[in-house]
Image (cartoon, helix red, strand yellow):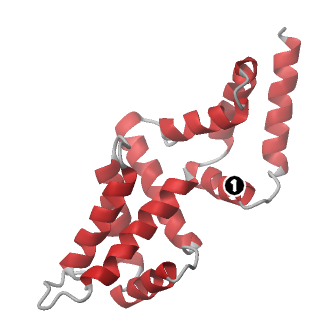
Amino acid sequence: MQHFQRQAIAIGLGFVTTVLAACGDTTTESGYPQSAIDGFMNGCMSDAGELEYARELCECAIDRIQQDYSFEEYREISQRVEGGEALPEEMLDITAACYSQISQETTGSAYPQQAIDNFIQSCTAGDESRQPVCQCAIDRIQEEFSFEEFIRLDRTVGEGGEPPAEITSIMDACVRGSSTSQ
């Protein structure tokens, strides 16, 4: 999940400097050149690959980016990302919010199936006997945390941080519940 977010926006941003040199480019109502929007969409879509609702996700992301950032700010972020800097958390949050919104509209669940599957796969770590504990955990996590909060927690843990106490308690409760039902 985290990988897609970072890459989709980074690739989308990467196309900006390529298309900025376009002469006589049509500027949209938001102040963004159409070529920058098209470049973002092309990069985002190519990275999204087979994601079920990639186009909707990428359109949502560029729409929100245009609302939150002037084109000059967007261009500066693009240049910093191309220079090796990490994407700002706010940009990652935009993608998480779009992912949640599109998933909710498409499937009725704010947690995309891909995120649930990734969690269970990571949680089981190849040991299928852990499936009930992992399913219990993701079910409870979905009850307790918005998808955006879950993504922030995932980023923290992915960057070497400790899982918050709430997640640890959920996991412990699911392990206890699983051991008493056997």
Q: In which quarter of the image is residue 66?
A: bottom left
Q: In this view, does 137 lie above or below 159?
A: above
Q: Where is residue 53 drawn, in percent x and y?
A: 33, 45
Q: Which residue lies furthest to the top in this view?
A: 182
Name the residue nearer the viewer: 87 or 151.
87
Residue at screen point 63% across, 33% down: 121
- Amino acid under disc 1: Leu
- Left or right relative to 85: residue 123: right
Residue at screen point 36% across, 48% down: 49
Residue at screen point 34% across, 68% down: 62
Residue 126 visible somewhere in the drawing: yes
**Helix or strand or loop: what does disc 1 sit on?**
helix
Q: Where is residue 168 drawn, in percent x and y?
A: 83, 42
- Left or right relative to 147: residue 10: left
What residue is shown with label 1?
Answer: 153
Residue 32 visible somewhere in the drawing: no
Q: Is residue 31 above or below residue 4?
A: below
- Left or right relative to 146: residue 76: left
Residue at screen point 21% across, 77% down: 35
Q: Where is residue 103 drawn, in percent x and y?
A: 42, 43
**CA neighbours of label 1 inside 10 A, class few (<14), some (14 to 19), many (20+):** some
The C terminus, quarter of image: top right
Q: Where is residue 108 drawn, in percent x and y?
A: 42, 35
Query: Across the whole image, how many numbered discs are drawn on residues?
Result: 1
